[in-house]
């Protein structure tokens, strides 16, 4: 089954940025110290690479930023992080959002040099902010959370003037040579509706019928028997998701494009909740046919609007196959516009066995049709006509009666002729006697 997308002309399908890559494995110290001479194909392709935080890094970040360590400077300070959507800068957030749980938990690190080359020009140079980062010193094999100035990023500072001050007590700082990585929040690109379970409720409305194709059934044998056939057909199944049943106030979901698991595939829907899938199916048909006959068949498909309710698990999709469970939903609604059934339309059969169409046909050669349960049904007039088996006996009886009548008539005529000859002899004898007396 092929995956297809059917979107309105006004709404374009979502395109995932190809040069923005997400890594889920942390970068090791040995990899940081290794100088790349010949970049790989993936490194050439990825203009921006974000590496997600490990569980240990995330716990350390929350403990450092959200726990009261007795530092008055930390309590008064507000440190920020960047928000990226599909590799594009989409605002900033403060560390209080992470502490309160309002920020998305998909946090990542982006190298400081990449931030300068791709996002520095979008920032206002007059702002006075500080950003959260981590610094790794290879000689000491030590990594610490730190913060650096907004002006360093805007001005593209890549020398000794750059400083990333250690969090909490701020008793140390790191330079550019210490592998500075800036904290960013990855925003979801789509929602995936997975583990879809359709509820019993449904409402089906029949629509129009469509000609799907032609076929022919042939019975080349000399016996009457059932013949079956099939035909392949394809169509686009349309899906219309009721987005108001997804984006409810209780769910608090952003209006993002949707991915729906359907027919074993992942189907992309637009923001209006509409899409389509290329479907390839097979229709089967058959009937009991006379010997040495064939019949043409037209396959007709019935379009329906099928309204369904379902429950599903909502996952956030961030790109490059990275997903995170969001919440379960139930009572969501959609409409499936599909071909729900097919039926054959048989034309008049063509037969080379003309004797089967005569009056003296036998029951085995009688035309029949195949019922839904597979049994054979005859037309009423055919059963009555074939039930008149007394006709041959009537003809034989008439022939016998005719023969008897002929024999009887022949006997009567023979007796009459015999008497007539005896009478003639008597009359001739009397005539001779009379002449003698005279």
Image (cartoon, rainbow, N blue to C red):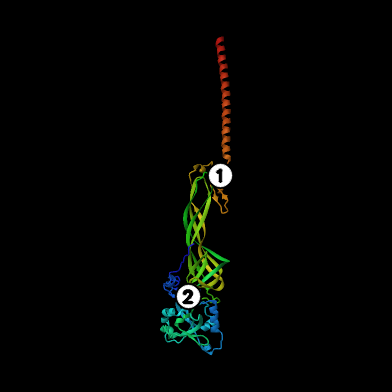
Q: CA distance from mark 2 to mark 1?
A: 84 Å
Residue at the extreme bottom:
72
Q: Residues within 10 Å of mark 1 (few under 14, many from 20)?
A: few
Q: Which residue is mark 2?
A: 31
Decide: few, some or many residues near mark 2? Use Cα within 10 Å; few <14, some 14-19, many ≥20. Answer: few
Q: Locate residue 287, reporting x and y percent.
A: 53, 51
Front-lying residue, 176 or 273:
176
- Closest to the observer, 303 or 323: 323
Question: Does residue 414 appear anywhere in the picture?
Answer: yes
Vertical position of residue 106 compared to residue 215: above or below: below
Q: Where is residue 231? Give x, y as percent.
A: 49, 55
Residue 353 x/y as whole percent: 49, 43
How far from the left and from the top, in percent, is residue 217? Answer: 49, 50
In this picture, is 394 found above or below 4?
above
List the residue tagged with mark 1.
364
Labels in figure, total: 2
Labels 2, 1: front one: 2
Identify the residue at image location x=53%, y=70%: 193
In the rendered image, the vertical position of residue 120 relative to residue 197, given as above or below = below
Instruction: Please tell me whether mark 2 sits on a helix, a strand or a loop.
Output: helix
């Amino acid at each position: 089954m092929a995956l297809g997308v059917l979107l309105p002309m006004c709404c374009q399908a979502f395109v995932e940025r190809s040069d923005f890559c997400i890594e889920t494995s942390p970068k090791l110290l040995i990899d940081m110290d290794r100088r790349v001479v010949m970049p790989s194909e993936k490194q050439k392709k990825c203009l921006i690479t974000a590496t997600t935080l490990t569980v240990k890094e995330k716990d350390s970040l929350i403990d450092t930023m959200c726990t009261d360590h007795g530092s008055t400077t930390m309590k008064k300070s507000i440190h920020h992080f960047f928000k990226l959507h599909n590799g594009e800068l989409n605002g900033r957030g403060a560390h209080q959002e992470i502490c309160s749980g309002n920020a998305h938990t998909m946090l990542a690190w982006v190298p400081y040099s990449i931030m300068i080359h791709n996002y520095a020009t979008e920032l206002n140079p007059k702002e006075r902010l500080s950003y959260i980062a981590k610094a790794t010193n290879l000689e000491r094999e030590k990594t610490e959370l730190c913060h650096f100035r907004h002006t360093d990023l805007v001005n593209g500072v890549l020398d000794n003037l750059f400083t990333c001050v250690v969090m909490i007590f701020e008793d140390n700082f790191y330079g550019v040579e210490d592998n500075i990585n800036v904290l960013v929040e990855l925003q979801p690109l789509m929602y995936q509706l997975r583990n879809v379970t359709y509820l019993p409720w449904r409402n089906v409305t029949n629509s129009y019928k469509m000609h799907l194709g032609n076929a022919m059934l042939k019975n080349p044998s000399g016996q009457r028997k059932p013949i079956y056939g099939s035909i392949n057909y394809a169509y686009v199944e349309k899906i219309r998701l009721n987005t108001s049943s997804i984006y409810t106030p209780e769910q608090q979901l952003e209006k993002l494009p949707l991915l729906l698991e359907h027919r074993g595939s992942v189907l992309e829907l637009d923001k209006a909740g509409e899409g389509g899938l290329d479907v390839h199916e097979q229709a089967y048909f058959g009937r009991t046919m006379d010997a040495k006959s064939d019949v043409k068949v037209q396959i007709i498909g019935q379009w329906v609007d099928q309204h369904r309710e379902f429950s599903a698990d909502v996952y956030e999709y961030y790109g490059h196959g990275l997903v995170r469970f969001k919440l379960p939903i139930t009572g969501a609604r959609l409409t499936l516009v599909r071909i729900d059934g097919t039926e054959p339309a048989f034309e008049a059969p063509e037969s080379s066995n003309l004797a089967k169409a005569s009056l003296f046909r036998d029951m085995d050669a009688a035309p029949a049709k195949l019922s839904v349960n597979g049994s054979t049904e005859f037309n009423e007039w055919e059963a009555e006509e074939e039930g008149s088996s007394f006709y041959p006996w009537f003809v034989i009886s008439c022939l016998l009666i005719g023969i008897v009548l002929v024999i009887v008539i022949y006997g009567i005529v023979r007796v009459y002729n015999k008497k007539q000859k005896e009478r003639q002899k008597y009359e001739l004898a009397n005539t001779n006697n009379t002449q003698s007396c005279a």
